[in-house]
Image (cartoon, grey):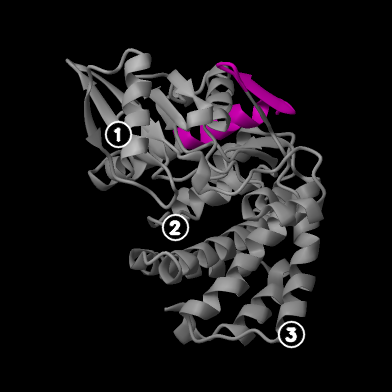
Amino acid sequence: MSSDRETLKADFLARHGYGDTRRQPLGGDASTRSYERLYRGDATFIFMDQPPALETAPCPPGATPDERRALGFNAAYRLAAGRVDAFVAVAGWLRAQGLSAPQVLAAEPALGLAVLEDLGDDLYAKVIAEGGDEPAMYDAAVDALVALHAAEPPAVLEAGGSTWPLLTYDDLALQMAQDLFVEWLPKLKPVTFDAAALADWQALWTPIRARAEAGASVFCHRDYHAENLLWLPGREGPARVGLIDFQDAVVAHPAWDFSMLLHDARRDVSPEIEARGLDRYLAARPDLDRTQFLADYHALGALNVARILGIFARLVTRDGKPRYESFMPRLWRYLDSCLADPALAGLKAWFDAHVPAEARA
């Protein structure tokens, strides 16, 4: 970190009344953000640092596909580019729905800095690994999605003096997602995709993307999994689920966050937990057609898992983060489960033809 950035951070903390706190760095993630825990007596806070210059621009509302591509990956894929104003606005909206996003205690989005309520360290993945009640915790995570999906997603999120557009996870963003697989897997594994294979790839996904965009109707966290959910058993109902890393939120098909939760790249989610979660959600949403929802869950789940395989291949080959390769066999198992749906036979045949077993290890 440059001394200029460190001075900026120290000045921010002093300006907002946190200059007297003790600072301790926290582990990072796959993004350009960093975090510290601040200590003052028995009180703790989270200090978020997202240097604005490290990301390409986010997507302006109304931008055409060509304009989005010209702006870069974040705009094309409708990512928030780590913007702190996105985090502030989304957090405020989630809290207004009665959900447990961190309270924003101080923020200067132009600097990429914020101080947040500390929701603790009890990530779902950690608590379950230590013997926590996995079924009850996943029930609560499903209930939080039910609550989220009951709210009408606004066009613009507003909170804490920040506004942020809630855009749709549309055809271009979904195409960018699916194509991460064919762009990055060949850099890691012994596969090649010729022009005919790539043409078939596009043709197979096009109707699935159309279903996804047509069904985009709910607020979508977009990264809803056991390392972004915190267990808060002292709270009630859906508020027992602490939410973080939600700044890339979009309007999407309700199956998307279910795939993130139940096709978790970093931990095994059993078929029993998966079935239990889907049954619980559908029981709470009698307005949904069960057969159609499950078909969409399998199709969008396949797209999501292919996307994550591409991201992990990129993290290994471009970013020098080899641990992500160890997660990939789990993803292949999830993909096989999705592709077992007879309606996805064509997609299954594509993977069988173009990605041999040795490339799935």
Residues at marks 1 and 2, CA–CA distance in whole angstroms? 25 Å
Q: Is 338 situated left or right of 315 in this image?
A: right
- Is residue 228 visible in the rendered image? The answer is yes
Mark 1: few/some/many CA within 10 Å (<14, 14-19, 20+) = some
Amino acid type at circle 3 is Ala
Extreme-top residue of the structure:
17
Q: Which residue is mark 3?
A: 195
Spatial separation of the CA atoms under disc 1 and disc 3: 47 Å
Residue 53 x, y percent position in the rendering: 51, 44
Placement of the N terminus among the 4 image quadrants: top left
Query: Looking at this view, is 328 or 72 the one in front?
Result: 72
Q: CA distance from mark 3 to mark 2?
A: 29 Å
As helix, strand or loop, the secondary structure at mark 2 comes to loop
- In the rendered structure, the answer to whether residue 337 lies left or right of residue 169 reads left
Point out the tag, 1 or 3, that comes first from the N-terminus: 1
> Three-letter amino acid code at disc 2?
Ala
The reply to whether callout 1 and callout 2 are in contact (CB within 8 Å) is no
- Could you tell me which residue is drawn at 37 percent across and 15 percent down? 15
Residue where numbered disc 1 is placed:
36
**How far across and how far down the image is residue 339, in percent?**
62, 69
Q: Earlier in the sequence, mark 1 or mark 2?
A: 1
Residue 205 picture quarter: bottom right
Look at label 1 and name its amino acid: Glu
Q: Nearer the viewer, residue 199 or 332?
A: 199
Circle 2 sits on which residue?
Answer: 265
Q: Residue 110 at x, y = what percent?
A: 53, 29
**Residue 156 place in picture, x, y as percent:** 71, 26
**Label 1 secondary element:** strand
Q: Give the magenta range.
A: 140-162
Q: Nearer the viewer, residue 173 or 301?
A: 173
Mark 1 touches mark 3? (CB < 8 Å): no
**Crowd rating for badge 3 (residues with CA inside 10 Å; few <14, some 14–19, many 20+):** few
